Image: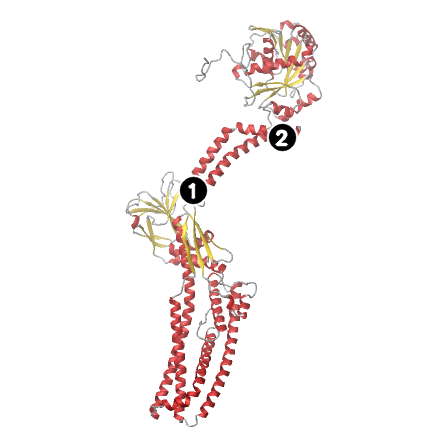
Amino acid sequence: MSSKHNINDDFRDTFELIVGKWKLILFCIIIAIGLAFAYLRYATYEYQATASIKINSNNDSSSQLPELSAVQNYGLFSSDFTNISDEIEIMKSRTILRKVIDELDLNIQYFELGRIKETELYKNPPINISFYEGDSIINQIDTTLYIKINSKTKFSLSSVEKNKILDLEDETAKTYSFGDKIATGFGNIVITPNSLKADSLKVGTNIKLNLISVDRMVDFYKTKISIVNSMGSDIVTLNVNDNLKERASLILNKLVEKYNEDVANDKAEIVKATSDFINDRLNLVSQELEQVDFSAESLQKQNRLTALGSQTNIYLASEKENENKVVNTTNNIQLIKYLQQELKDKSSNEDVLPADIGISDNGTSQIIKAHNDLVQQRNRMLKNSSDKNPIVIRLANEINSLKQTLKGTLNTMKSTNEITLSALNQEGNRIRGQIYSAPTKQRQITDIKRQQNIKESLYLYLLEKREESAINQGLSSNNAKIIDRAYTGSLPISPKKGFIYMAALVLGTMLPIIFVYLSNLLDTKIHTKKDLMKVLSIPFIGDIPRSERKKRVIKKIDYSPKAEAFRIIRSNIDFMLKSRKHESKTMFVTSTRAQEGKSHTSINLASSLSFSKKSTLLIEADIRVPKVKEYLELEGSKNGLTDYISDESIEIKDVISTLKDNEYLSIIHSGSIPPNPAELLMSDRMHELFKFVKDKYDYIVVDTAAVGLVTDTFLISDFADMFIYVVSAENIDKRALENAQTLYEEKRLPNMTVLLNGTTKTKRGYGYGYGNNPNRKKKWYQFKKS
């Protein structure tokens, strides 16, 4: 229970200590909030722009061939390259970001310099800079130029910032006219005023021009741009943080635009490869068709065959169906040969194959599409990597595997179609053998017609595919559909005013509280009675408040807190020495060291006792550092204690002094300072002195030397009825009181008590000065009661 009580008391004391420092806490809070306001006033705010897009996916896993799925699930990479994660990496690639930075001129920054803060100007800056060198040089520059507008036509240019406080311009600054060609380390430049803001160009304006390399800006914005996607969704959210709201939105919109352009270029590459392939085959088929037409024309002219319709229809009706099959089979074989030749010509992993050329096999079309997708993915990776990249190597292996699969499939299809064609030809020979009556020339015409039909059919088919390719190129849609264009919020994301002010309030409150708590925790001084009682178990007789130096001695009519305190101590002495009701009461006053108020206590205690009309004697036994004569302003050279002890001719009555205004108070001051104070105090004359004065006075107050410094007090301690041990508040260390506790426990000083001197006024308790001073003047704000 006692432990819990002590914890509660400690907590309450700490709380009251902190509350007592409310002025310090309030001051710190005001300072903290003021600093927060100044920080927010001149901070560079950062805003966030957000955009949403939908990535179009053309993948159809349900129709994929087993062998194609096996290739895509090869190794550690199980996801298809067209998934959302791959597209996000493409959007964040350095290639796309470089295009955005180049087009928006993000590597050129304009700042208007103020006394404290510099403001960036992106849209319509007051001046424009033009370069003579190419982008390959300008995009590698890292430098800063400082420009001061001297007039509407002239400006100063320097590479060193001027002194903002004293408004001193750098000595190296040179003056130019707008439009002058200026030679620099990175080539010639021209600075001109912005035509849109020519009227607002203020004289004296200081502008900082930052030229930053594009690579550095790419690295910077790679950390500022974030692209996120929810699992299983094609919706992608793009965010960018920037200190200018307009620029943040422009960056995201341009990023989406450049991504769509990059995807469109990839699609255009496939369409172009297909178109080139079809055009080449059209030229070849056109030449072959011309040769067949010319052969038919020559044969008819030579044999004068102009009317062969009716007889031919009769003989050839039975083989018409067989001819159609021959035509289709021959077309397939020819297209397979073309594609095999294309595979042979484009053996590199960087070349795409023509897609959808009319081969009547769905598996072959899917393999070609997968091959082209892998080639595009590899080419994209090579833009930001090398052919040593594990992903690039994996893609190359997959491409080669698909090519081998495609070659095998084409060989199988070719063999199958050749067998079919051979069977159809045999069937045709059998039918033609039955037409025994048909003229030989007619059969020649029929063969030529058949060749014409085959070539015409193939020619028309290729024309149709060329048109389809052109239409697909014209109808190509963006890969990223914009759901929400970039929007920048009106409130900055950093710094946040609410958080800054809250942090300032918390710090302004907690720092002084922590300071006060730690100061109290590390404080080893004695301040209050409670501090003293934690260190000493000596009976506490009272405490004396701190007073003004000019009011060191109390008066008979005195309403001050110090006078009230000595009255309380007087009452406590009478209570503790009540057993000596009809005897003299001797009190020794001592302390641990000098300057603790021992003499001050002795003099005022003796004065307070005498004011009760009791005969009181004050003996100054601290013969090393006497102070009584200074305190009481005693005049004359009357002998003192040391004179009496050392000179047997001097009687006790010769060393006793009295005060004019206090007949009950007598004083024996220390006298001359001797060379051997300890030996003097051991003299028998001290016994005679105390025996004499105890019979004559009601109270005897002895001001002794500090027990922590000399042994003088111990030599005469047997004459004391009570020891008052003075402890100076706000002055002495707690550890220095260990000696006092030892003296009490060993009972080396009789009837030992402790007195706390020099306490300060606290908020707790009613304090001293109970009652009213009739002579006290009232303040102007204190009204009299009616």
Query: If the image is split into quadrants, where does the C terminus sit?
Result: top left
Q: Where is residue 68 in the image (x, y as percent from the top left)?
A: 53, 69
- Between 502 and 320, the one lying in front of the other is 320
Residue under label 1, please give it. Answer: 43
Measured along the vertical axis of the image, is residue 304 above or below residue 335? below
Residue under label 2, please give it. Answer: 7
Q: Would residue 340 be found to the left or right of residue 170 on screen?
A: right
- The quadrant in which residue 11 appears is top right
- Between 656 and 59, the one lying in front of the other is 59
Q: Residue at x 36, y 87 (%)?
A: 296
Measured along the vertical axis of the image, is residue 519 above or below residue 542? below
Q: Position of residue 744 (x, y in %)?
A: 69, 21
Q: Where is residue 641 in the image (x, y as percent from the top left)?
A: 64, 10
Most extreme residue toward the right is: 746
- Give the mark nearest the N terminus, 1 or 2: 2
Query: If the image is split into quadrants, where does the N terminus sit?
Result: top right
Can residue 159 be seen in the rendering of this structure? yes
Can residue 140 be seen in the rendering of this structure? no
Query: Type of residue at label 2?
Result: Ile
- The quadrant in which residue 737 appears is top right
Q: Would residue 649 be found to the left or right of residue 662 on screen?
A: right
Secondary element at tag 2: helix
- Between 7 and 667, the one lying in front of the other is 7
Secondary element at tag 1: loop
Q: Would residue 783 be found to the left or right of residue 571 on screen?
A: left
Distance from label 1 to label 2 (Cα)? 46 Å
Query: Type of residue at label 1?
Result: Ala
- Labels 1, 2: front one: 2
- Dot 2, crowdedness within 10 Å: few (<14), some or many (≥20)? few
- Between 638 and 215, the one lying in front of the other is 215
Callout 1–callout 2 Cβ contact below 8 Å: no
Measured along the vertical axis of the image, is residue 52 above or below residue 580? below
